Amino acid sequence: MTLRRRWYSERSTIGVLALGDFSCFTLEDRARPAGVKVQNETAIPAGRYKVVVNFSQRFQRRMPLLFDVPMFSGIRIHSGNTPENTEGCILVGEWRAPDWVGDSRRAFADLFALIESAADLWIAITDAPVVDTRKPEGSAG
């Protein structure tokens, strides 16, 4: 499973998650520089993490959990729409808008069926390069 972060704002990070032929959008908290964490407002570090399905006490159901995430614990993939719905977790949706993913429950149900059937699952999370689109000082219009 791959998650490529693509769109960044002051409130959230939106990416594209792919597993086989399935793909959806993701919404996470704001991505910050390596080693910087604001409690409940920071995306997990890019990296490769083992994914298992187990019972979530918080959600009272079986859900995907990421293992060995530096500086984080209890990171899950689940439904939700806005940065307020995630505390470091990865939200999924079928469409995106600024700081929003939509049709999240449907996207999660489709993804969860694939995750449950996988034998040994890992997620690789990558950050897109940040491109400075400002014009250099003194350049023409």
Image (cartoon, grey):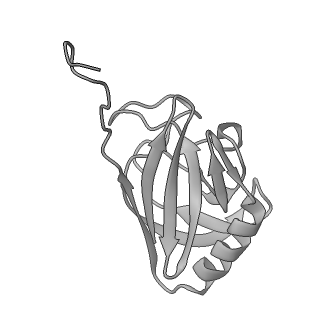
The reply, left or right, for residue 122 in relation to residue 137 is right
Q: What is the x, y in percent for residue 131?
A: 30, 38
Residue 118: quadrant of the picture: bottom right
Residue pushed farthest right?
A: 60
Instruction: Tell me, yes or no, if residue 87 can be seen here.
Output: yes
Q: What is the x, y in percent for residue 47?
A: 35, 56
Picture residue at 61% right of the left edge, 72% below the top: 53
The reply, left or right, for residue 93 in relation to residue 106 is left
Q: What is the x, y in percent for residue 41?
A: 56, 33
Q: Nearer the viewer, residue 85 or 67?
A: 85
Picture residue at 21% right of the left edge, 20% below the top: 136
Picture residue at 50% right of the left edge, 28% below the top: 38
Picture residue at 75% right of the left edge, 57% below the top: 57
Considering the image in quadrants, where does the C terminus appear? top left
Q: What is the x, y in percent for residue 96?
A: 63, 51
Position of 3 relative to 30 (above/below): below
